[in-house]
Amino acid sequence: MNRGHQKFRNYRQEQRLTQRRVLAAAVFVFLLVCVLIGRLFYLQVIEHDLYQTKADDNRVMLVTEPPPRGLIYDRNGVVLADNRPIHSLTVTPERIADFDALKQTLNTIIDITESEWQDFDRALEEYRRPYQSITLKSQLTDEEWAKVSVDLYKLDGVQVEAQLTRYYPFGEAFAHAVGYVGRITSKDLETVDRLAYQGALFIGKTGVEGYYEETLFGQAGLNKVEVNARGRIMSELERQTPTPGKDVHLHLDARLQQYAYDLLGDYTGSVVAIDPETGGILALVSKPGYDPNLFVRGISVKDYGDLRESRKLPLFNRALRGGYPPASTIKPFMALAGLEYGFASWTEQYYAKGYYQINPNGRRYRDWKRSGHGWIDLERSIIESVDTYYYQLANKMGITPIHNFLTRFGFGQGNLLDLRGESRGLLPSNEWKKAKYKEPWYPGDSVNVGIGQGFMVATPVQIASATSALAGKGHYFYPRMAQTIGDSEAQFEENLGKEHRIVLKDQGNWDRMTNAMRRVITDSKGTARRLRGTEYDIAGKTGTGQVFSLQEDQEYDADSLDRRLHDHALFIGFAPAEKPKISVFAIFENGGSSSKPADLTRSLFDAYLYDDYPAKYDYLKGRNHE
């Protein structure tokens, strides 16, 4: 039987093949080990610092500690913005398993409003570090604190924390000047250093609080802490204590501020008092005000709605943003402009009828005194506030000289150094009207501006600072709130905060204008003669601003009008007339008679110059009077 060729296995060849495979595998493994060792060497030795830093970033976290906020004082050491310790109910979301159950439990222990839960939900959505607590209810009463403390052991993630909160002891009279702090929002975080404000609850929103936020806030402390994988703090490694914010001392006089606010009575209006020697604002009143404490921890929807919907606009800062016709308070400045440009003189006589006409058959611009004033000169035009004199003067000058001269006194500009939101008012010009209305400037427009009406609008701060320049005989200071910051005098931007000198061709006109304004009070026909009898001389000027325009022959009848249509009542003044220590602008909205702001101004002069305030204001004296 034939059999096929049988193939025998070559064991030696298979052994050599196996050995080669094992060797190749060993070499491959060896190479992999070398690569691994090389990689480990690279990571552990060459890139050690980099990965050590990354590891620390995962393990170590920088946590900021908000500093105590600086205080705000008046010129006599009265605290206008304080820090007070409170106890707040806070929640750490990462430690809560069931929010709905927690909400039900807390609502059975203390009263937590729906608005407070909504604020909590909003805060939960905003940026924060892990395990950072969120305030649910602030300023717990002793009773609420006791109730929560009893059940705190079974409320995981809930704690009562002691916190410092801003407090404004004098409320609405100071709200528009001092301002307020409020909760930090995501929008606020876009304008500040997020790390510095991490953990901070408040930020300055308005007034001095807003402008000096960086100064008052101070420098946050930095704590280096060790955290676990979930970001929870396990231990503190290093601590850098925060630097408290600097205190800010204002020029503001607390007694003068509160007294001026009260003297406005039930009228809306504004009072601004300035020290002519420094430009420091002694009082900045806008009435009505509001309670700034409502905003500190987050104002309720209802309270905010009430403020927004009020017809008296308590949130509107009239001192900075109120646009009013300066009315006859502009006449001293108009007279100086006429003298400066040669359109008027102290000796020239003018026959003041009861009206003025640009053209013989044209419109009659009425004087407040229908029978006229007869022959007068410039000084008497100030004493008796003769409208027709300024009609003809403005018509002769035209708007360009008027605009150029009044600009030197700060009209139409924002000159307040350290408060935001000031309106520039409106000092009209030929160019402005062409741009705004596509029309030329007409002589009748100048006539209206001549008595502070028509297109012209000014803010109380502007009129007050211009009056201060009159008091200082051309020494114009940019108005400012802060006197010192910390232990140093307040500094402002270059070219600001310094004395600005208004130089006239005849410097003697300052003294003559002061005398004319003094006779507004002392002369038997002076429009503010009711203020006679003081031991010091007052220089002043009354004003009555129209709220609506009268027809050519229409007479103003206050008795037949709703109060909101009554004329605004204005007054500017400074005292003592020769060496002024204080200048004041006051306006009573729809006040009618200028006697109201004139009487208010005299009361402020008496109180400030002689330190003679009603006894009920003794609580605002401050340490400098003790």
Image (tube, helix red, strand yellow):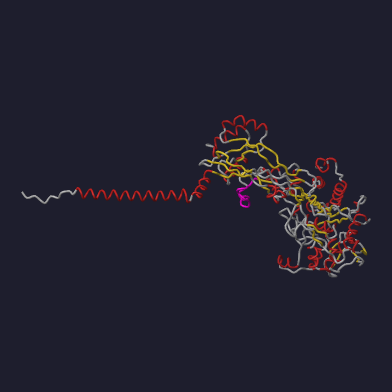
| Residue at the bottom extreme, as displayed | 360
Q: Quadrant of residue 508?
A: bottom right
Tally of numbered tags: 0
Query: Where does residue 605 sit, x and y in percent of width and height?
Result: 86, 49
Query: Where does residue 463 sit, x and y in percent of width and height?
Result: 80, 57
Prevalent SS, magenta region: loop
> Does residue 185 belong to the magenta stretch?
yes
| Residue at the left extreme, as displayed | 1
| Residue at the right extreme, as displayed | 524
Res. 6 visible in picture? yes
Q: Nearer the viewer, residue 566 or 134?
A: 134
Locate the C terminus and report the quarter of the image it occupies: top right
Q: Nearer the viewer, residue 154 or 553?
A: 154
Res. 369 visible in picture? no
In the displayed structure, would residue 333 be above or below residue 8? below
Query: Where does residue 28 sit, x and y in percent of width and height?
Result: 33, 50
Q: Residue at x 85, y 42 (%)?
A: 614
> Does residue 8 belong to the magenta stretch?
no
In the displayed structure, would residue 60 be above or below residue 499? above
Query: Where does residue 250 sit, x and y in percent of width and height?
Result: 77, 49
| Residue at the top extreme, as displayed | 150
Q: Residue at x 61, y 52 (%)?
A: 190
Which region of the structure is painted magenta? 183-196
